[in-house]
Amino acid sequence: MSKSRNLFFLSSLSLVFIFALAYNFADRNITKLPSEPRTVNAEYDFDLRIIAAANAANAPRQTGGPLGLGRKALDEEITAWDLDIAPDGTGLPVGSGSVSYGEEIFSEQCGACHGDFAEGVDRWPELAGGEGTLADDDPLKTVGSYWPYLSTAWDYIHRSMPFGYAQSLSDDDVYAMLAYILYSNDIIDDEDFVLSNENFLDVEMPNAEGFIIDDRDMTEYPVFSQDPCMEDCKVNVEVTMRARVLDVTPEDDGS
């Protein structure tokens, strides 16, 4: 009996020691972030800065809501998530990048999946080619053949690429990489071309006219958003034709 008690005591002591080590590690490395955190890429540490700012500001939790959870977002947090680029260029940062530099960083950051010439590797997406295939049974949708706005490509690359290390590219890197993708699609043919926020809207995408404006908010929503009629919806009801005359009733042929 004494051996079992001693074994239980030693096991409990070991667990307490392990939990103490885990708490100490978390307390030093997770909950307390440095005021100026550093990562391998200065453009990639904005999220750490935001958390540090929130800790420094000691932002109060929201107590007036129905659940009493959360807190008001900091201006830094809102700014960090405000990444979208509109087709008219709204939101584009100042910057520029050449085709030659774009080829270099594309090979380093994207070539493993998309190929050195944006042709795709294995089943990873192709970014170039596909011109004139959209009407085919198996169309090839690439930046050059399908995307109507260049801003979509800039936004997606900046927001989500490279895979596994999103938002690690500088603005100039994104301009350069997109310039190389345009060159790979023969949308531009000058190896010395430099894409920037100033000439961004001058680039014409081949499928820019292949999409229509979604006007359902004006043409459909008002019609189908009204309160439904439940009674006396039609003054007179008149039968104008019979299904048998119209020959729309299926016949039973006994099969």
Image (spheres, rainbow, N blue to C red):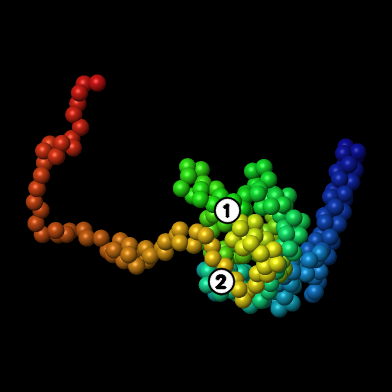
Taking the view exactly as shown, the residue that stands out farthest to the front is 190
Which residue is at a point 81% across and 64% down the rendered structure image?
40
Disc 2, SS: helix
Spot occupied by residue 125 in the image (x, y as percentages of width and height): 62, 49
Inter-mark Cα distance, 1 to 2: 19 Å
On-image quarter of the C terminus? top left
Q: Which residue is mark 2?
A: 201
Give the side of residue 117 with respect to residue 72, left or right. right
Residue 34: image location, x then y, percent? 81, 71
Name the residue located 86 percent from the left edge and 57 percent from the top edge.
Answer: 21
Residue 73 is situated, as x and y percent measured from the top left of the image, at: 61, 74
Inspect the image, locate mark 1, and give the three-letter code of the amino acid beneath it: Thr
Give the mark count: 2
Instruction: Return the residue nearer the eye: 14 or 183.
Output: 183
Q: Tell me which corner region of the image, top left, top right, bottom left or bottom right, holds residue 17.
A: bottom right
Tell me if 4 is positioned left or right of 225 in this view: right
Q: Which residue is mark 1?
A: 142
- Quadrant where the N terminus sits is top right
Residue at image x 10%, y 53%? 237
Question: Label 2 is placed on what type of residue?
Answer: Leu
Q: Nearer the viewer, residue 20 or 33?
A: 33
**Is residue 65 at all visible to an observer of this figure?**
no
